[in-house]
Image (cartoon, rainbow, N blue to C red):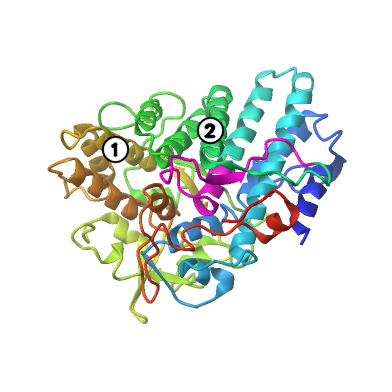
Amino acid sequence: MKKQIKYIIALSLVLITGISCKKEYLTPVPLTSVSDLTAFDTPERILGNVRTLYSNTKAGAFYGGRYIVYGDIRGEDFLNETGNIVTGADVWALNPTGTSTNSVINLWSQAYFTINLCNLTIEGVAAKGPSVLSATPALTNNYLGEARFIRALCYYSLLQYYARPFADGAGSKPGLPLRITAIKGPGFSDLARSTVAQVYAQILTDLNFAEANLPLTNASAELNTIRAHRNTAIALKTRVYLSMQDYPNVIVEANKIVSTLAPFTATTGVAHALQPNIATVYSTFNTTESILSFPMSISAGDNPTVQNQLAFYFVRNLTLPGSAEYSLNPLGIVGDLTGWPNSDARRGLLFFNAVTNKRFVNKYPNGSPFLDYPPVIRYSEVLLNLAEALARMNTATADPRGLALVNAVRQRSDASVTITAANQAALINVILLERRIEFLGEGLRNNDLMRLLQTIPGKGAVPAKAPSDQGYIWPISANEMALNKLMVDN
Protein backbone atom coordinates (compact mmCIF):
# COMPACT_ATOMS: atom_id res chain seq x y z
CA MET A 1 0.00 0.00 0.00
CA LYS A 2 2.87 2.34 0.73
CA LYS A 3 4.91 1.48 -2.33
CA GLN A 4 4.44 4.84 -4.06
CA ILE A 5 5.53 6.99 -1.13
CA LYS A 6 8.46 4.69 -0.38
CA TYR A 7 9.71 5.12 -3.92
CA ILE A 8 9.38 8.89 -3.70
CA ILE A 9 11.19 9.11 -0.37
CA ALA A 10 13.92 6.73 -1.47
CA LEU A 11 14.83 8.79 -4.51
CA SER A 12 14.41 11.99 -2.57
CA LEU A 13 17.05 10.93 -0.06
CA VAL A 14 19.39 9.20 -2.51
CA LEU A 15 19.71 10.94 -5.88
CA ILE A 16 21.49 9.11 -8.65
CA THR A 17 24.02 10.93 -10.80
CA GLY A 18 26.28 9.93 -13.66
CA ILE A 19 26.14 9.34 -17.39
CA SER A 20 25.32 6.50 -19.72
CA CYS A 21 27.11 5.30 -22.79
CA LYS A 22 25.05 5.98 -25.91
CA LYS A 23 22.26 8.27 -24.69
CA GLU A 24 24.33 10.12 -22.11
CA TYR A 25 22.32 13.29 -22.54
CA LEU A 26 19.27 11.84 -20.86
CA THR A 27 19.89 8.63 -18.99
CA PRO A 28 22.35 8.53 -16.12
CA VAL A 29 23.79 5.15 -15.19
CA PRO A 30 24.21 4.83 -11.39
CA LEU A 31 27.93 5.34 -10.85
CA THR A 32 27.55 6.69 -7.34
CA SER A 33 24.87 7.64 -4.84
CA VAL A 34 24.91 10.90 -2.93
CA SER A 35 22.82 12.44 -0.19
CA ASP A 36 20.26 15.03 -1.22
CA LEU A 37 22.31 17.47 0.85
CA THR A 38 25.22 17.17 -1.60
CA ALA A 39 23.40 16.13 -4.79
CA PHE A 40 23.77 19.61 -6.27
CA ASP A 41 27.31 20.37 -5.09
CA THR A 42 29.04 20.03 -8.48
CA PRO A 43 28.09 20.91 -12.06
CA GLU A 44 28.20 17.21 -12.96
CA ARG A 45 25.79 16.27 -10.19
CA ILE A 46 23.37 19.03 -11.16
CA LEU A 47 23.42 17.92 -14.80
CA GLY A 48 22.96 14.32 -13.70
CA ASN A 49 19.81 15.23 -11.82
CA VAL A 50 18.42 17.13 -14.81
CA ARG A 51 19.06 14.11 -17.04
CA THR A 52 17.26 11.93 -14.51
CA LEU A 53 14.07 13.96 -15.09
CA TYR A 54 14.04 12.97 -18.75
CA SER A 55 14.91 9.33 -18.08
CA ASN A 56 11.94 9.02 -15.73
CA THR A 57 9.56 10.77 -18.12
CA LYS A 58 10.50 8.24 -20.80
CA ALA A 59 9.86 5.27 -18.50
CA GLY A 60 7.79 2.46 -19.97
CA ALA A 61 4.78 3.31 -17.79
CA PHE A 62 4.84 6.88 -19.09
CA TYR A 63 6.06 8.44 -22.36
CA GLY A 64 8.33 5.50 -23.17
CA GLY A 65 5.26 3.55 -24.14
CA ARG A 66 2.08 3.18 -22.16
CA TYR A 67 0.93 6.79 -21.94
CA ILE A 68 1.07 7.06 -25.72
CA VAL A 69 -0.57 3.67 -26.21
CA TYR A 70 -3.44 4.50 -23.86
CA GLY A 71 -4.07 7.74 -25.73
CA ASP A 72 -4.76 5.78 -28.90
CA ILE A 73 -6.51 2.65 -27.73
CA ARG A 74 -9.17 4.55 -25.79
CA GLY A 75 -10.31 5.88 -29.16
CA GLU A 76 -12.14 4.17 -31.99
CA ASP A 77 -9.31 3.38 -34.39
CA PHE A 78 -7.86 0.25 -32.75
CA LEU A 79 -9.10 -3.26 -31.97
CA ASN A 80 -7.72 -5.38 -29.16
CA GLU A 81 -6.22 -8.69 -30.31
CA THR A 82 -5.32 -10.45 -27.05
CA GLY A 83 -7.73 -9.56 -24.24
CA ASN A 84 -4.73 -9.13 -21.96
CA ILE A 85 -5.47 -6.81 -19.02
CA VAL A 86 -1.74 -6.42 -18.43
CA THR A 87 -1.37 -4.78 -21.84
CA GLY A 88 -4.36 -2.49 -21.55
CA ALA A 89 -7.39 -4.52 -22.62
CA ASP A 90 -9.42 -2.76 -19.89
CA VAL A 91 -8.23 0.63 -21.14
CA TRP A 92 -9.31 -0.27 -24.67
CA ALA A 93 -12.68 -1.47 -23.34
CA LEU A 94 -13.11 1.88 -21.54
CA ASN A 95 -13.43 0.01 -18.28
CA PRO A 96 -10.39 0.55 -15.99
CA THR A 97 -12.79 1.20 -13.13
CA GLY A 98 -10.75 -0.34 -10.31
CA THR A 99 -8.44 1.96 -8.40
CA SER A 100 -5.94 -0.90 -8.17
CA THR A 101 -5.67 -1.75 -11.87
CA ASN A 102 -2.18 -1.67 -13.39
CA SER A 103 -2.90 1.19 -15.76
CA VAL A 104 -4.46 3.42 -13.10
CA ILE A 105 -1.75 2.85 -10.49
CA ASN A 106 1.36 2.74 -12.66
CA LEU A 107 0.73 5.84 -14.75
CA TRP A 108 -0.18 7.88 -11.66
CA SER A 109 2.85 6.62 -9.73
CA GLN A 110 5.37 7.24 -12.50
CA ALA A 111 4.06 10.73 -13.26
CA TYR A 112 4.06 11.82 -9.61
CA PHE A 113 7.43 10.17 -9.05
CA THR A 114 8.81 12.32 -11.88
CA ILE A 115 7.04 15.42 -10.54
CA ASN A 116 8.76 14.92 -7.19
CA LEU A 117 12.13 14.60 -8.91
CA CYS A 118 11.35 17.88 -10.70
CA ASN A 119 10.54 19.52 -7.38
CA LEU A 120 13.78 18.23 -5.85
CA THR A 121 15.75 19.52 -8.81
CA ILE A 122 14.05 22.91 -8.78
CA GLU A 123 14.79 23.36 -5.08
CA GLY A 124 18.35 22.03 -5.34
CA VAL A 125 19.31 24.05 -8.41
CA ALA A 126 17.70 27.23 -7.06
CA ALA A 127 19.65 26.86 -3.81
CA LYS A 128 23.06 25.86 -5.15
CA GLY A 129 23.08 26.61 -8.86
CA PRO A 130 24.14 30.27 -8.62
CA SER A 131 27.32 29.34 -6.75
CA VAL A 132 28.09 25.94 -8.28
CA LEU A 133 27.42 27.13 -11.83
CA SER A 134 28.93 30.61 -11.42
CA ALA A 135 31.24 30.02 -14.37
CA THR A 136 28.19 29.52 -16.62
CA PRO A 137 25.45 31.55 -14.88
CA ALA A 138 22.79 31.01 -17.56
CA LEU A 139 22.80 27.27 -16.81
CA THR A 140 20.99 27.77 -13.50
CA ASN A 141 17.90 29.14 -15.21
CA ASN A 142 18.28 26.76 -18.15
CA TYR A 143 18.10 23.79 -15.80
CA LEU A 144 15.24 25.29 -13.83
CA GLY A 145 13.42 25.78 -17.13
CA GLU A 146 13.90 22.13 -18.05
CA ALA A 147 12.65 20.93 -14.68
CA ARG A 148 9.58 23.15 -14.84
CA PHE A 149 8.89 22.12 -18.43
CA ILE A 150 8.89 18.45 -17.46
CA ARG A 151 6.75 19.12 -14.40
CA ALA A 152 4.24 20.89 -16.64
CA LEU A 153 4.22 17.98 -19.10
CA CYS A 154 3.58 15.53 -16.25
CA TYR A 155 0.67 17.50 -14.82
CA TYR A 156 -0.88 18.05 -18.24
CA SER A 157 -0.61 14.33 -18.97
CA LEU A 158 -2.28 13.34 -15.68
CA LEU A 159 -5.17 15.72 -16.30
CA GLN A 160 -6.08 13.89 -19.52
CA TYR A 161 -6.96 10.69 -17.62
CA TYR A 162 -7.74 11.49 -14.00
CA ALA A 163 -9.73 14.73 -14.17
CA ARG A 164 -12.75 16.10 -15.97
CA PRO A 165 -11.94 18.03 -19.16
CA PHE A 166 -11.56 21.79 -18.82
CA ALA A 167 -14.65 22.24 -21.00
CA ASP A 168 -16.76 20.62 -18.27
CA GLY A 169 -17.40 23.61 -16.03
CA ALA A 170 -14.55 25.82 -17.28
CA GLY A 171 -12.04 24.01 -15.10
CA SER A 172 -14.10 24.13 -11.92
CA LYS A 173 -14.16 20.35 -11.36
CA PRO A 174 -11.67 18.51 -9.10
CA GLY A 175 -8.24 18.27 -10.65
CA LEU A 176 -5.09 16.86 -9.06
CA PRO A 177 -3.10 17.25 -5.87
CA LEU A 178 -0.82 20.11 -6.93
CA ARG A 179 2.52 19.18 -5.43
CA ILE A 180 5.10 21.86 -6.17
CA THR A 181 7.41 21.27 -3.21
CA ALA A 182 9.58 18.19 -2.83
CA ILE A 183 8.64 15.26 -0.62
CA LYS A 184 11.77 14.28 1.30
CA GLY A 185 10.29 12.17 4.08
CA PRO A 186 7.08 10.71 5.49
CA GLY A 187 4.20 12.85 6.63
CA PHE A 188 3.79 15.03 3.53
CA SER A 189 1.22 13.02 1.56
CA ASP A 190 -1.99 14.76 2.61
CA LEU A 191 -3.02 17.29 -0.02
CA ALA A 192 -6.49 18.08 -1.34
CA ARG A 193 -7.20 18.21 -5.04
CA SER A 194 -6.83 21.58 -6.72
CA THR A 195 -9.36 22.41 -9.40
CA VAL A 196 -8.66 21.61 -13.03
CA ALA A 197 -8.28 25.34 -13.70
CA GLN A 198 -5.74 25.71 -10.89
CA VAL A 199 -3.65 22.86 -12.23
CA TYR A 200 -3.72 24.34 -15.73
CA ALA A 201 -2.70 27.70 -14.26
CA GLN A 202 0.36 26.08 -12.68
CA ILE A 203 1.18 24.29 -15.93
CA LEU A 204 1.15 27.60 -17.78
CA THR A 205 3.19 29.33 -15.08
CA ASP A 206 5.83 26.63 -15.45
CA LEU A 207 5.79 26.81 -19.24
CA ASN A 208 6.03 30.60 -19.27
CA PHE A 209 9.06 30.35 -17.00
CA ALA A 210 10.51 27.67 -19.24
CA GLU A 211 10.01 29.76 -22.37
CA ALA A 212 11.78 32.71 -20.77
CA ASN A 213 14.72 30.70 -19.46
CA LEU A 214 15.39 27.79 -21.79
CA PRO A 215 18.05 28.27 -24.47
CA LEU A 216 16.95 29.29 -27.96
CA THR A 217 18.70 26.20 -29.29
CA ASN A 218 20.75 23.36 -27.90
CA ALA A 219 24.18 22.26 -29.09
CA SER A 220 23.11 19.73 -31.74
CA ALA A 221 20.17 18.41 -33.72
CA GLU A 222 19.98 15.48 -31.32
CA LEU A 223 19.85 17.71 -28.24
CA ASN A 224 17.25 19.92 -29.92
CA THR A 225 15.07 16.82 -30.14
CA ILE A 226 15.66 15.18 -26.76
CA ARG A 227 16.18 18.19 -24.45
CA ALA A 228 13.81 21.12 -24.04
CA HIS A 229 14.56 24.51 -25.60
CA ARG A 230 12.45 27.64 -25.91
CA ASN A 231 10.33 26.42 -28.81
CA THR A 232 9.59 23.16 -26.97
CA ALA A 233 7.85 25.15 -24.24
CA ILE A 234 5.95 27.24 -26.78
CA ALA A 235 4.81 24.13 -28.67
CA LEU A 236 3.50 22.51 -25.50
CA LYS A 237 1.64 25.71 -24.65
CA THR A 238 -0.27 25.45 -27.92
CA ARG A 239 -1.43 21.97 -26.84
CA VAL A 240 -2.32 23.15 -23.34
CA TYR A 241 -4.33 26.14 -24.52
CA LEU A 242 -6.11 23.99 -27.10
CA SER A 243 -7.14 21.62 -24.30
CA MET A 244 -8.54 24.62 -22.42
CA GLN A 245 -10.38 25.80 -25.55
CA ASP A 246 -8.50 29.08 -25.19
CA TYR A 247 -8.16 29.60 -28.92
CA PRO A 248 -6.86 33.20 -28.87
CA ASN A 249 -3.86 32.09 -26.82
CA VAL A 250 -3.23 29.09 -29.08
CA ILE A 251 -2.87 31.62 -31.88
CA VAL A 252 -0.60 33.91 -29.84
CA GLU A 253 1.74 31.06 -28.92
CA ALA A 254 1.78 29.32 -32.30
CA ASN A 255 2.50 32.56 -34.11
CA LYS A 256 5.81 32.73 -32.24
CA ILE A 257 7.05 29.66 -34.11
CA VAL A 258 4.91 29.51 -37.27
CA SER A 259 5.48 31.90 -40.14
CA THR A 260 2.55 33.85 -41.54
CA LEU A 261 2.72 32.28 -44.98
CA ALA A 262 3.66 28.92 -46.46
CA PRO A 263 6.03 27.18 -46.34
CA PHE A 264 5.34 27.31 -42.63
CA THR A 265 8.49 27.30 -40.51
CA ALA A 266 9.81 28.60 -37.22
CA THR A 267 11.86 31.71 -37.90
CA THR A 268 13.43 32.00 -34.43
CA GLY A 269 15.06 29.43 -32.22
CA VAL A 270 15.24 25.93 -33.66
CA ALA A 271 14.20 26.11 -37.33
CA HIS A 272 11.23 23.76 -37.10
CA ALA A 273 9.65 22.68 -40.37
CA LEU A 274 7.76 19.75 -41.84
CA GLN A 275 9.94 17.08 -43.39
CA PRO A 276 9.30 16.68 -47.13
CA ASN A 277 8.91 12.91 -46.64
CA ILE A 278 6.76 11.83 -43.68
CA ALA A 279 8.65 8.53 -43.42
CA THR A 280 11.81 10.44 -42.47
CA VAL A 281 10.23 11.43 -39.15
CA TYR A 282 10.18 7.77 -38.06
CA SER A 283 13.63 6.80 -39.34
CA THR A 284 15.73 9.91 -38.64
CA PHE A 285 14.54 10.83 -35.19
CA ASN A 286 16.26 14.20 -34.77
CA THR A 287 14.87 16.20 -37.67
CA THR A 288 13.57 19.74 -37.17
CA GLU A 289 10.01 18.40 -37.26
CA SER A 290 10.60 16.48 -34.03
CA ILE A 291 10.20 19.12 -31.33
CA LEU A 292 10.47 16.59 -28.50
CA SER A 293 11.13 12.86 -28.63
CA PHE A 294 12.76 10.50 -26.19
CA PRO A 295 15.86 8.51 -27.21
CA MET A 296 16.30 4.82 -26.61
CA SER A 297 19.42 2.67 -26.64
CA ILE A 298 20.47 -0.89 -25.89
CA SER A 299 21.95 0.15 -22.53
CA ALA A 300 20.25 -1.37 -19.51
CA GLY A 301 17.53 0.94 -18.24
CA ASP A 302 17.63 3.03 -21.40
CA ASN A 303 14.68 1.44 -23.20
CA PRO A 304 11.20 0.43 -22.07
CA THR A 305 10.90 -2.92 -20.40
CA VAL A 306 8.83 -5.85 -21.66
CA GLN A 307 5.21 -5.07 -22.64
CA ASN A 308 5.75 -1.31 -22.65
CA GLN A 309 7.26 -0.55 -26.05
CA LEU A 310 5.22 1.12 -28.78
CA ALA A 311 6.23 -1.47 -31.37
CA PHE A 312 5.25 -4.26 -28.98
CA TYR A 313 1.67 -2.96 -28.98
CA PHE A 314 1.22 -1.85 -32.55
CA VAL A 315 3.46 -3.80 -34.92
CA ARG A 316 2.88 -7.10 -36.67
CA ASN A 317 5.78 -6.88 -39.09
CA LEU A 318 6.76 -10.20 -40.61
CA THR A 319 10.50 -9.55 -40.24
CA LEU A 320 10.62 -7.71 -36.89
CA PRO A 321 7.37 -8.57 -35.16
CA GLY A 322 6.02 -7.00 -32.04
CA SER A 323 3.23 -8.66 -30.11
CA ALA A 324 0.58 -6.86 -32.20
CA GLU A 325 -1.71 -6.27 -29.25
CA TYR A 326 -3.80 -3.79 -31.25
CA SER A 327 -4.75 -3.89 -34.90
CA LEU A 328 -6.40 -1.06 -36.79
CA ASN A 329 -10.18 -1.01 -36.77
CA PRO A 330 -11.37 -1.38 -40.39
CA LEU A 331 -14.36 0.78 -39.47
CA GLY A 332 -12.09 3.49 -38.08
CA ILE A 333 -9.98 6.10 -39.83
CA VAL A 334 -8.06 3.47 -41.81
CA GLY A 335 -11.30 2.50 -43.56
CA ASP A 336 -12.10 6.07 -44.66
CA LEU A 337 -10.78 5.98 -48.22
CA THR A 338 -12.57 9.22 -49.06
CA GLY A 339 -11.04 11.26 -46.26
CA TRP A 340 -7.78 9.33 -46.37
CA PRO A 341 -7.17 8.08 -49.91
CA ASN A 342 -4.65 5.43 -50.89
CA SER A 343 -2.53 8.11 -52.58
CA ASP A 344 -1.53 9.44 -49.15
CA ALA A 345 2.05 8.49 -48.18
CA ARG A 346 0.99 8.05 -44.57
CA ARG A 347 -0.69 4.81 -45.61
CA GLY A 348 2.83 3.60 -46.23
CA LEU A 349 3.33 3.77 -42.45
CA LEU A 350 0.83 0.93 -42.03
CA PHE A 351 1.52 -2.78 -42.31
CA PHE A 352 -0.97 -5.16 -43.88
CA ASN A 353 -0.74 -8.75 -42.72
CA ALA A 354 -2.09 -10.78 -45.61
CA VAL A 355 -2.32 -13.88 -43.46
CA THR A 356 -4.71 -12.34 -40.92
CA ASN A 357 -6.15 -9.65 -43.21
CA LYS A 358 -5.40 -7.07 -40.53
CA ARG A 359 -3.62 -3.70 -40.63
CA PHE A 360 -1.24 -2.36 -38.01
CA VAL A 361 0.52 0.92 -37.33
CA ASN A 362 4.11 0.54 -38.52
CA LYS A 363 5.57 3.89 -37.41
CA TYR A 364 7.79 2.00 -34.96
CA PRO A 365 9.19 -0.83 -37.10
CA ASN A 366 12.30 -1.71 -35.13
CA GLY A 367 12.11 -5.02 -33.32
CA SER A 368 13.43 -5.91 -29.89
CA PRO A 369 14.90 -4.07 -27.98
CA PHE A 370 12.54 -1.49 -29.57
CA LEU A 371 14.75 1.57 -30.01
CA ASP A 372 12.37 3.85 -31.91
CA TYR A 373 12.12 7.30 -30.30
CA PRO A 374 8.61 7.85 -28.86
CA PRO A 375 7.33 11.16 -30.29
CA VAL A 376 5.97 13.68 -27.78
CA ILE A 377 5.51 16.84 -29.87
CA ARG A 378 5.93 17.29 -33.62
CA TYR A 379 5.79 20.49 -35.65
CA SER A 380 2.80 19.22 -37.60
CA GLU A 381 0.84 19.29 -34.35
CA VAL A 382 1.65 22.95 -33.83
CA LEU A 383 0.45 23.69 -37.37
CA LEU A 384 -2.83 21.84 -36.82
CA ASN A 385 -3.30 23.38 -33.36
CA LEU A 386 -2.99 26.80 -34.97
CA ALA A 387 -5.25 25.85 -37.86
CA GLU A 388 -8.00 24.73 -35.51
CA ALA A 389 -7.72 27.80 -33.30
CA LEU A 390 -7.95 30.09 -36.35
CA ALA A 391 -10.92 28.12 -37.65
CA ARG A 392 -12.80 28.32 -34.37
CA MET A 393 -12.19 32.05 -34.01
CA ASN A 394 -13.36 32.89 -37.55
CA THR A 395 -17.11 32.30 -37.55
CA ALA A 396 -17.71 34.14 -40.81
CA THR A 397 -15.91 31.81 -43.17
CA ALA A 398 -13.42 28.99 -43.55
CA ASP A 399 -10.34 30.79 -42.28
CA PRO A 400 -7.87 31.10 -45.20
CA ARG A 401 -4.72 30.65 -43.14
CA GLY A 402 -6.26 27.76 -41.23
CA LEU A 403 -7.08 26.11 -44.54
CA ALA A 404 -3.53 26.71 -45.80
CA LEU A 405 -2.08 25.14 -42.65
CA VAL A 406 -4.12 21.95 -42.88
CA ASN A 407 -3.25 21.70 -46.57
CA ALA A 408 0.44 22.03 -45.71
CA VAL A 409 0.15 18.94 -43.53
CA ARG A 410 -1.97 17.01 -46.04
CA GLN A 411 0.02 17.90 -49.14
CA ARG A 412 3.31 16.96 -47.52
CA SER A 413 1.96 13.40 -47.73
CA ASP A 414 -0.39 13.68 -50.69
CA ALA A 415 0.30 16.42 -53.22
CA SER A 416 -2.65 15.26 -55.33
CA VAL A 417 -5.19 16.45 -52.75
CA THR A 418 -6.24 20.01 -51.98
CA ILE A 419 -8.56 20.25 -49.01
CA THR A 420 -11.46 22.65 -49.38
CA ALA A 421 -14.03 23.84 -46.87
CA ALA A 422 -17.19 25.82 -47.56
CA ASN A 423 -17.56 27.27 -44.07
CA GLN A 424 -16.24 27.26 -40.50
CA ALA A 425 -17.83 23.95 -39.52
CA ALA A 426 -16.48 22.18 -42.59
CA LEU A 427 -12.98 23.46 -41.92
CA ILE A 428 -13.05 22.32 -38.29
CA ASN A 429 -14.19 18.87 -39.40
CA VAL A 430 -11.36 18.44 -41.90
CA ILE A 431 -8.81 19.60 -39.32
CA LEU A 432 -10.07 17.05 -36.79
CA LEU A 433 -9.95 14.36 -39.49
CA GLU A 434 -6.40 15.37 -40.37
CA ARG A 435 -5.38 15.01 -36.72
CA ARG A 436 -6.67 11.44 -36.61
CA ILE A 437 -4.64 10.57 -39.71
CA GLU A 438 -1.45 12.46 -38.85
CA PHE A 439 -1.15 11.32 -35.23
CA LEU A 440 -2.39 7.74 -35.55
CA GLY A 441 -0.33 5.71 -33.09
CA GLU A 442 1.11 8.80 -31.37
CA GLY A 443 -1.29 9.04 -28.44
CA LEU A 444 -3.23 12.24 -29.16
CA ARG A 445 -6.68 10.82 -29.86
CA ASN A 446 -7.73 10.70 -26.20
CA ASN A 447 -6.62 14.31 -25.71
CA ASP A 448 -8.80 15.44 -28.61
CA LEU A 449 -11.88 13.58 -27.40
CA MET A 450 -11.46 14.90 -23.86
CA ARG A 451 -10.84 18.55 -24.73
CA LEU A 452 -13.96 18.68 -26.86
CA LEU A 453 -16.01 16.78 -24.25
CA GLN A 454 -17.01 14.31 -26.94
CA THR A 455 -18.44 10.85 -26.52
CA ILE A 456 -15.74 8.23 -26.95
CA PRO A 457 -16.98 6.19 -29.93
CA GLY A 458 -17.62 2.49 -29.59
CA LYS A 459 -15.57 -0.13 -31.40
CA GLY A 460 -15.99 -3.86 -31.78
CA ALA A 461 -18.15 -5.05 -28.89
CA VAL A 462 -17.26 -2.00 -26.77
CA PRO A 463 -20.12 0.52 -26.50
CA ALA A 464 -19.61 4.26 -26.76
CA LYS A 465 -18.78 6.14 -23.57
CA ALA A 466 -20.58 9.45 -23.02
CA PRO A 467 -19.04 12.21 -20.90
CA SER A 468 -21.58 11.46 -18.17
CA ASP A 469 -20.77 7.73 -18.07
CA GLN A 470 -18.62 6.03 -15.45
CA GLY A 471 -15.20 5.37 -16.94
CA TYR A 472 -15.09 8.50 -19.08
CA ILE A 473 -12.22 9.46 -16.81
CA TRP A 474 -10.19 7.11 -14.65
CA PRO A 475 -10.47 6.55 -10.90
CA ILE A 476 -7.69 7.84 -8.66
CA SER A 477 -4.87 5.42 -7.85
CA ALA A 478 -5.48 3.22 -4.83
CA ASN A 479 -1.99 4.09 -3.57
CA GLU A 480 -2.86 7.78 -3.51
CA MET A 481 -6.18 7.08 -1.82
CA ALA A 482 -4.43 5.05 0.89
CA LEU A 483 -1.70 7.60 1.59
CA ASN A 484 -3.55 10.90 1.16
CA LYS A 485 -6.29 11.41 3.73
CA LEU A 486 -7.52 14.50 1.90
CA MET A 487 -7.88 12.76 -1.47
CA VAL A 488 -11.35 12.26 -2.96
CA ASP A 489 -11.89 9.70 -5.73
CA ASN A 490 -13.56 10.48 -9.05
Tag 1: residue type?
Answer: Ala
Q: Which of the labelled discs sits on residue 201, or is there none?
A: 2
Q: Residues within 10 Å of mark 2 (few under 14, many from 20)?
A: few
**Depth check, front residue: 258 or 78:** 78
Q: Secondary structure at mark 2?
A: helix
Percent x, y of residue 72: 43, 59
Residue 178 within the segment the image draws in magenta: yes
Q: Which residue is mark 1?
A: 387
- Is 383 above or below relative to 285? above
Tag 2: residue type?
Answer: Ala
- Is 405 above or below relative to 330? above
- Where does the magenta region start and end? 155-183
Name the quarter where the N terminus is drawn.
Answer: bottom right
Q: Earlier in the sequence, mark 1 or mark 2?
A: 2
Q: Secondary structure at mark 1?
A: helix
Give the foreground label among 1 and 2.
Answer: 2
Q: CA distance from mark 1 to mark 2?
A: 24 Å
**Depth check, front residue: 138 or 201:** 201
Percent x, y of residue 6: 80, 53
**Depth check, front residue: 51 or 250:** 250
43 relative position to 330: left or right: right
Q: Is residue 30 visible?
A: no
Q: Residue at x 53, y 43 (%)?
A: 156
Q: Residue at x 32, y 27 (%)?
A: 259
Quarter of the figure with residue 459: bottom left
